[in-house]
Amino acid sequence: MAEYAANIGLEVHAELSTKTKVFCGCLTAAGAPPNTQVCPVCLGFPGSLPVLNRAVVDYALRVVLAFNCEVSRPSIFERKGYYYPDLPKNFQISQKRAPLGRSGYVEFPVDGEMHRVRIADIHIEEDAAKLTHPEDDRAHSLVDFNRAGMPLLEIVSEPDMHSPSQVEGYMNAIRSALLYLGVSEARMEQGQLRFEASVSVRPADRAELGIRVEIKNLNSFRAVLGAVKYEIARQTKAVQAGETILQETRLWDDLHEVTAPMRTKETAMDYRYFPEPDLMPLVVDDEWIARVRAELPELAGRRRERLVREYALSDYDAGILTAEKALADLFEAAVSRGAPAKPAANWLTGRFLYLLNERNLTAADAALSPEALAEVVELVESNTISGPAARQVFDRIAFSGESAKKVVAELGLTQISDQDELGTTIDEVIAEHGDAAENYRKGKESALKFLVGQVMRKTRGRANPKLATELLEKKLKAD
Amino acid sequence: MKLTPEQVEHVALLGRIKLTEEERELFTTQLNSIISHFEQLQQLDTSGVPPMSHAVPVSDVFREDEPGESLSTEEALQNAPEQARDCFQVPRVIE
């Protein structure tokens, strides 16, 4: 059977984190009560005039330059016309013919190799209002215009991805870059990152792309990956059966994990773009570009290489740390406060990520301070607290932001490394668990572990496990 | 280029405008005369001339990222034909 290859392209819509909207002074704060961050401009009142927010251009320029794009000069805004209740003016201000950035690329590792995806265009546009469809009134929908006019950056890739793992790598690279560049909070659950995918399949030995299908309603990485996998399988099967793929837009169904054709009116979408007469062309000068370029922060890829070089971390650990900017920031801040690199990295990539995943949070949501992290590492290295006690402390400071030393003092967790004090506890354990002691003497090594565990339990994790093991062995052999 | 009544109908539909038979004929004739007027421009050789988007030579008009004045919810909803729960209320757009 013939081999098939897939070509996948992605459009990413990212909400920019400027203080105010793109064309008016309304706030962009999340979670505000409905229709409280609105004005004549973002409500589309006749006679109101949009004025471009300089910070939006600055943020967009960071992304454009970070992704190696050319800057269009002039860059112009256009009206994209369509009717829907979420669009107050019946057109969306967007960019088409002269987007701010074009012809760039982004590179990221996939299975140990760098993969390059070309960026076709990066443009600025305004978001639409938010619609809700109340359960208790099936005849109406409700419109909240707080989101209308929020600044969006749309990043359009060429169809240069060929597998779900490349798509995942691309999405991670984009999200990470947005966070590193400080231009978006990129929170998917709040709709700050949204996606559209295009998928086509072709015989692997043919260069010409197959018919492309667009997929909408992708609001999470999981949805994108599910939809891409589903479409590749569906289209491959259809092509193998000699069927023709329809050029269409399909919607991802999160519940049933399938894509289905979008119901469309007979008239195809015809946006009738034309230049927005109310907004003058944007001509970013050389000085502006040079300034933004000079201020570009180190992105994840470079930082990963540096962490390996400077702190002798494994590439794997450095990769995990740099995947989220806040995590790598914590690491470097703790090390600069004297924490040895390896144990600090271990706490973050191990226990900390475990706790965050368990709570469905990111490092930026936690309260862990670099000082507290450095303290925990120091307390363990100096044998002041035991491993289990350290974990107990860490679990608390990760979300409370307290000092580790304070928590250790409060909970009385200082490690017992005193032979006499520990000896008393060990005598008690041996007395209470005569069977286990007997088993050990008969040569059952695992009984020792059990007894050490009992000592740890009796001291609520405060015993120095190494010392406890040594003392136990000594006492059991002496008896 | 000549515009057909079907194309006029299509454009009217995109603009959510309902045309009577007479209007459709009238606008077809009128739009065709506008288009033929502009077609005279096609005789000029414009290769090498960049497309113009704006008639005035002004660029880079910005506002700073500073909060301005917003309307109160009450003011915003004042002219809404229908409202509910501090939102504009519209006919259901999904099933």
Image (cartoon, helix red, strand yellow):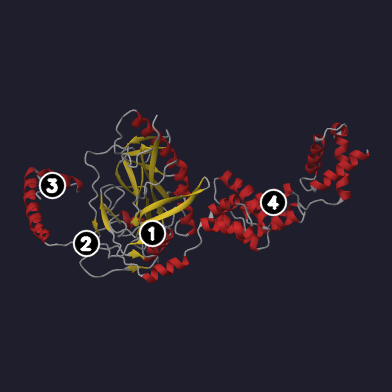
Q: How far apart are marks 2 and 4 (CA)?
A: 66 Å
Q: Distance between the residues labelled 4 and 3?
A: 73 Å
Q: Which amino acid does label 4 sit on?
A: Val
User: Residue at the spot x=33%, y=56% of the render?
Assistant: A125
Q: Is disc 1 placed on a helix, strand or loop?
A: loop
Residue B8: give its label.
3
Q: Is disc 3 placed on a helix, strand or loop?
A: helix
Q: What residue type is labelled 2?
A: Pro
Give the percent coordinates (x, y) of residue A332.
61, 60
Determine whether label 2 and label 4 are within 8 Å by CB.
no
In this figure, which residue is indicated by the disc labeled 1? A69
Q: Is the same chain shared between marks 3 and 1?
A: no
Q: Which of marks 4 and 3 is in front?
A: 3
Q: Tell me if A23 is positioned left or right of A325 in this view.
A: left
Give the percent coordinates (x, y) of residue A335.
65, 60
In front here: A468 or A286? A286
* Mark 3, other Cα within 10 Å: few <14 / some 14–19 / many ≥20: some
Q: Pinpoint the chain carrying mark 4.
A: A
In front here: A183 or A30? A183
Q: Which of marks 2 and 4 is in front?
A: 2
Q: Residue extending furthest right? A: A479
User: Residue at the spot x=93%, y=40% of the render?
Assistant: A478
Q: Nearer the viewer, mark 3 or mark 1?
A: 1
Q: Distance between the residues labelled 3 and 1?
A: 40 Å
Q: In which quarter of the image is residue B68?
A: bottom left
Q: Distance between the residues labelled 2 and 3?
A: 26 Å
Q: Pinpoint the chain carrying mark 2.
A: B
Tell how many labels.
4
* Mark 4, other Cα within 10 Å: few <14 / some 14–19 / many ≥20: many
In this figure, which residue is indicated by the disc labeled 2? B51
Residue A393: give its label.
4
Q: What residue type is labelled 3?
A: Val
